[in-house]
Amino acid sequence: MDVIKLKPLSVCDTNSYIAVSKAGNAALIDAPADADYILGEIEKRGLALKMILLTHGHFDHVGAVADIAERTGCDVYIHERDFTKLTDPESQLIQFFHVRGYRPYAGAKPIGDGDIIKLDEIEFDVIHTPGHTSGSVCYIADDVMFSGDTLFARSVGRTDMPDGSYEDLMRSMAVIKDLGGDLRILPGHMGETTLETERRLNSYLK
C-alpha cells in the first residue's frame, strides 16, 4: 500500500491521505475541503478513487465529501454514530465555526467496530475509538493507522465539543495502547508519529 499525504486543508489545517492499491485504485481518508485540489491530486497520478473513509463527522474532515462523491461515484463510509453528522450542520460544527458553502451528503454507508473494508489487496480494519466524537474511528491497514482526531503526536483530540467524552477517549486510548506491535500513525492534524513513540511519550497512553 502506498500512502500519499495531501496538503493541510480547511480552516483547521486538516490532513487527508490517499491510500493506493497495486492496481492504482485509491481510498481517500477524510475529505476536508477543496474537492478540485483533491481530485486533481488523484487524477494527475492516474488513480481511480473508489472510496472515502471518514474518521468522524466534523466539517473539517467531511467538507468535500458531497462534491467528490457526486463527481466520482465513489463509496463513502462513516461510523454509524456519526452518520447523521453528514446531514446535520449543528452536530458537524458548521455553525460553531461559521463555515460557509457546506453541502450535506446523505449517501454514506454506516460502519461499525470490527468491520473490514477492502480495496483490492488492502484491508482497512475499523476500530471504533469514541471520545472526540461518539462515532470516531481509526483505520488500520498494513502497518499504518489513520487516527483522525483520536490520537496525535504527544496529544489527543479535544473532547469539549458536543458529542465529545473524555472518559470515552481514555477508554479508546487503552484500546490503542494494547494494539500489538508498532504502527505508523497518520493523524488528522499536525505531523505523523508511531505507536511505540506514543506509548513512551504520550501521557494519555500511559
Image (spheres, rainbow, N blue to C red):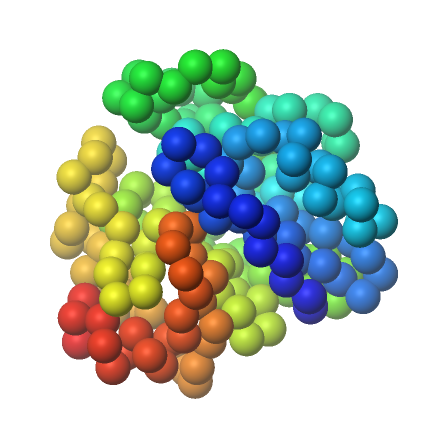
Q: Residue at x 30, y 42 (%)?
A: 133
Q: Position of residue 41 (x, y in %)?
A: 71, 44
Query: Is 172 situated left or right of 81 in this image?
Result: left
Of residues 59 and 106, the one drawn nearer to the viewer in this rendering: 59
Quarter of the figure that contains the N terminus: bottom right
> How many badges with numbers are in the image?
0
Q: Residue at x 63, y 62 (%)?
A: 3
Q: Position of residue 191 (x, y in %)?
A: 41, 61
Q: Position of residue 13 (x, y in %)?
A: 41, 41
Quarter of the figure that contains the C terminus: bottom left
Name of the residue lying farthest toward the bottom? 181
Residue 79 can be seen, yes or no? no
- The quadrant holding residue 187 is bottom left
Q: Indicate whether 43 appears above or below 120.
A: above
- The quadrant holding residue 75 is top right
Query: Is 134 situated left or right of 194 in this image?
Result: left
- The quadrant holding residue 2 is bottom right
Q: Residue at x 65, y 35 (%)?
A: 37
Q: Position of residue 9 (x, y in %)?
A: 49, 38
Residue 11 can be seen, yes or no? yes
Q: Indicate whether 70 appears above or below 29.
A: above
Q: Residue at x 43, y 65 (%)?
A: 192
